[in-house]
Amino acid sequence: MAMLSKKQDGPLLPHAPQLPARDRELHPQAVQAISAYSTALETVEQLTADLKKMSNDLVIERRHNASLRAALTKLQEDRDYYYRYAAELRTSLGNITMIMMQAEKKAQEMANRPPPQVVEEEELIADKDLKEVVSSLEAEISGINVGHVRNSTVAPTNHPPRQ
């Protein structure tokens, strides 16, 4: 829009006829209003361009924000997985440590225990008990009918019964 300017020593509008005195006083106010309107239009155009640029920037920032959120979510999922894995590993290592400590304690107990004493077979049965066993076997043998033993399928043996 063309701005009207006041020429020195001449009319404001070169092609305009002379205005009455009353209109001449309003004319500078109209020129100022048109100038203000023109400035307001330029400001609106500048603000509209700024708004479009900011809108585009906002869309770009939102996309970037969404991609960062997706990456953050992925990292949080990975972190949670590894925390769970670490907790399971810690539990397993605790169990292994406990087993190792129990094995070490048992080994120390076995190392500190006196060696087992070898008991000979003769000492197992006291002489008194041995005499009782022999006499009871002799009594059983003497009470058995010899003919009956010969007719049975079991052959007599001279070995004492196992205990």
Image (cartoon, rainbow, N blue to C red):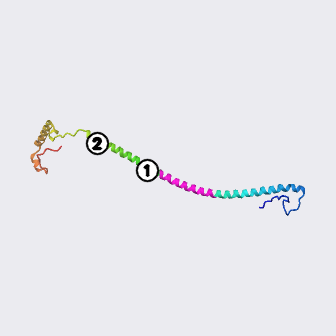
Identified by mark 1, the residue type is: Tyr
Q: Residue at x 36, y 46 (%)?
A: 96
- Residue 85 is labelled as 1
Q: Quadrant of the N terminus?
A: bottom right
Q: Work out whether mark 2 precedes mark 1 in sequence or the reverse, and give the earlier one.
A: 1
| CA–CA distance in space, label 2 to label 1 | 33 Å
Q: Secondary structure at mark 1?
A: helix
The region drawn magenta spans 56-79
Element on which disc 2 rests: helix
Q: Which residue occupies 9% across, 46% down?
A: 146
- Residue at 9% across / 48% down in the picture? 147
Q: Is residue 57 magenta?
A: yes
Q: Where residue 102 is drawn, which disc sits there?
A: none
Q: Nearer the viewer, residue 65 or 120?
A: 65
Q: Residue furthest right?
A: 20
Quarter of image, res 16: bottom right
Q: Nearer the viewer, residue 86 or 48?
A: 48
| Circle 2 residue | 107
Q: Quadrant of residue 41?
A: bottom right
Q: Nearer the viewer, residue 141 or 63?
A: 63
Q: Is residue 59 magenta?
A: yes
Q: Is residue 6 left or right of residue 119?
A: right
Whether residue 143 sits left or right of residue 74 in the image: it is: left
